[in-house]
Image (cartoon, rainbow, N blue to C red):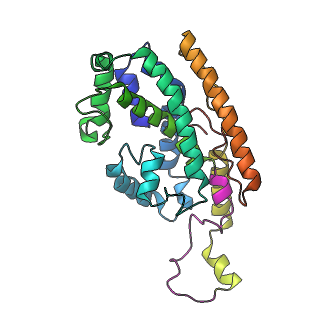
Amino acid sequence: MDGIATSMNRQLSPSHPIYKLLRPHFKDIISINKYAAKTILKYGTMLESWSMGFHGFKQLILKATPHINFKRAIGSVESDATARGVWDKDVLPYYPFRDDAMALYNIIKKYVTTIITHYYDTTASVSSDWELQNWHTELTKPRAQGGVGITDLPGTRGFRDIGEVIDVVAMFISQTAVGHTAGNFPQYDMYGYLPNYPAKIMEGPPAQKIEYTEADIMRILPSKRDTVRVMRYTQILSWQGANELSDFEKRYLYDPLSIKANVALKEDLKEFSKEVKNRNRDRLFPYKYLDPNYVPNGISI
């Protein structure tokens, strides 16, 4: 998303409607990533508490980067869940992330559709927008050539219809808001108790089924220093410090239709929040993370 935000700033002017639509959702991405690169990658303070270490982390990124694509890595809930065999509710009835994320995506897409169809009323208005076409070129250009490297972005040789623009913008907003929330904010709940997901073990993983004593387990688990460090980092990363989705800190679209669309977005999210809370009352394990009250506008900590 850092590359997508950068390409938006390069190719779309601040007066462009797509820039105005996306800007609230890209508010802190570049600064957060720069800080993370300095604290995690350059100095590796967090990685000292992980078994993989700094070099293992780099290898993991290098291994994952070539697989970045639009349908799965950038936020299509349906494509990703289908590829992992968990889209069918008959196969996996209880999967709150899938259900809540898809519902939120549909709400976001409705909002995006209202605004984009206001500014683009014909196919020609899309194909003749040279800023939009240049953005598409940079998004799809290989990383080695200075592009973002998204291999399967909708649109052949550029955006050719309104639906392609809607899909791309809705997916980008969904990933910055919904995708990041689902991956980021549960970290302390999952990793704060180290025996649940130890980031480091002091010897190789168990290779045979034997009975471990409490002393064996304590010997394998991280030290107190590493435990406290992981708890501190995951607690910080799990803290939501930005406005919730639809409550923009700065408004970029002022026309009457866009303001009305924002009001409708707020109402849709409010109703969905009630639905999530009602479902959580009956769930054995409540899933609160994609309640719109917890979902910020974009990537933030």
Q: Residue 248, how many percent across, how many down?
A: 61, 23
Residue shown at 52% from the left, 29% from the top: 110
Q: In the displayed structure, would residue 257 be above or below residue 286?
A: above
Q: Is residue 242 visible?
A: no
Residue 83 sits in quarter: bottom left
Is the magenta region chiefly helix, strand or loop? loop
Residue shown at 73% from the left, 51% from the top: 280
Q: Residue 152, how many percent across, how many down?
A: 30, 42
Residue 151 sits in quarter: top left
The residues colored magenta run 186-211
Q: In the displayed structure, would residue 204 be above or below residue 185?
A: below
Is residue 198 rendered magenta in the image? yes
Residue shown at 53% from the left, 38% from the top: 105
- Spot the residue most to the right: 281
Q: Residue 73, how many percent across, how many down?
A: 41, 47
Q: Is residue 227 visible?
A: yes
Q: Nearer the viewer, residue 142 or 70?
A: 70
Q: In the displayed structure, would residue 217 be above or below residue 10?
A: below
Say whether residue 269 is left or right of residue 208: right
Quadrant location, the N terminus: top left
